Image: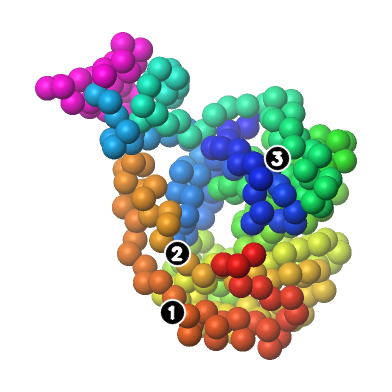
């Protein structure tokens, strides 16, 4: 069984063609700018969207974590058993559950509903997160089943896993969407809470195994403006890279934090001048560099 957050159809930003992307729960990194905070924790999470609440009280009849006081909804997280019953009964969609358990046998048919669109557009299915390699057995089984259906597969990963886990995925992945957030270990720790030693070693393994890789570089000047030149020089040594995408930071995901009981860090947006200079630096060393804002 695996834990997923959502399935999104007709995606065009997660690999080639029209794709269906499934987002898995759990990530070993804590990127300061994360756009999918609902995917970070490995455990299931219930979020309360106050602006959607009708104050009807239906949830308190099915779950002790919800009570009505003075006509207002009160959620007690310590009483939540992650049963999900309240989300099923909520008429306003104010309660949302992240971390639905599902088997590979159940999931794969949902992912290939749009197979004709995949074939017509050169698309397929992308496994994303969070970090899908935190659920290696589940991820591998899903990828294996997709390949049996002749579906193009992409794995969106930060590369923070054991080399054995990564190697086990290679036969079932057509394209790796591989994040590089910094080159220097100390810069990576400051930005994500973890060293990038294993991440860089795993990318070298993909290169040695002749995997097809699209590099994705979140561009957050506060954390990695001084890393772009070093990343570019490193990428120049790899033959597996088919495309490099610079992904300038945006704050669209900040609204997701408050319902999760967290606070988004205030991070300045990159200027157009900073973005263009980063693109210029990358293009001076590697081919097929794209501005991720316009893909």
View extreme (left): residue = 70
Residue occupying image coordinates x 79% and y 38%: 115
Whether 258 is among the magenta residues is no
Kindly identify which residue carries mark 3: 139
Q: Where is residue 101 shown, x and y percent of the image? A: 58, 27
Kindly identify which residue carries mark 1: 271
Quadrant (top left/top right/bottom left/bottom right) for the N terminus: top right
> Who comes first in sequence, dot 2 or dot 1?
2
Q: Where is residue 60 shown, x and y percent of the image? A: 29, 16
Q: Is residue 249 above or below residue 87?
A: below
Q: Quadrant of residue 109?
A: top right
Q: Nearer the viewer, residue 247 or 28?
A: 247
Residue occupying image coordinates x 46% and y 56%: 34
Compute the Cα span from label 1 to label 3: 37 Å
Residue occupying image coordinates x 47% and y 55%: 35
Residue 217 shows in the view: no
Give left or right: position of 90 versus 18: left
Magenta span covers which residues? 56-80
Q: Which mark is residue 250?
A: 2
Give left or right: position of 144 versus 98: right
Compute the Cα span from label 2 to label 1: 11 Å
> Who comes first in sequence, dot 1 or dot 3?
3
């Amino acid at each position: 069984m695996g834990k997923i957050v959502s399935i999104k159809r007709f995606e065009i930003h997660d690999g080639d063609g029209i794709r269906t992307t499934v987002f898995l729960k759990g990530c070993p990194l804590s990127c300061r700018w994360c756009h999918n905070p609902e995917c970070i924790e490995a455990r299931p999470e219930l979020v309360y969207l106050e602006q959607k609440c009708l104050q009807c009280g239906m949830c308190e009849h099915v779950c002790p974590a919800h009570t009505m006081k003075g006509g207002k909804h009160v959620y007690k997280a310590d009483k939540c058993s992650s049963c999900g019953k309240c989300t099923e009964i909520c008429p306003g969609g104010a309660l949302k559950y992240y971390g639905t358990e599902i088997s590979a046998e159940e999931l794969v048919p949902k992912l290939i509903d749009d197979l004709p669109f995949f074939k017509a557009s050169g698309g397929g299915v992308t496994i994303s997160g969070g970090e899908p390699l935190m659920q290696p057995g589940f991820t591998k089984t899903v990828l294996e089943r997709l390949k049996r259906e002749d579906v193009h597969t992409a794995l969106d990963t930060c590369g923070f896993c054991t080399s054995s886990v990564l190697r086990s995925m290679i036969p079932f992945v057509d394209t790796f969407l591989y994040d590089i957030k910094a080159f220097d270990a100390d810069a990576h720790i400051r930005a994500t809470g973890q060293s990038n030693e294993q991440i860089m070693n795993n990318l070298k393994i993909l290169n040695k195994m002749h995997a097809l890789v699209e590099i994705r570089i979140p561009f957050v000047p506060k954390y990695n403006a001084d890393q772009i030149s070093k990343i570019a020089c490193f990428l120049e040594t790899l033959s597996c890279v088919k495309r490099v995408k610079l992904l300038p930071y945006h704050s669209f995901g900040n609204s997701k934090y408050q319902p999760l009981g967290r606070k988004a860090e205030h991070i300045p947006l990159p200027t157009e001048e900073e973005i263009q200079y980063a693109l210029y630096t990358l293009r001076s060393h590697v081919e097929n560099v794209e501005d991720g804002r316009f893909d």
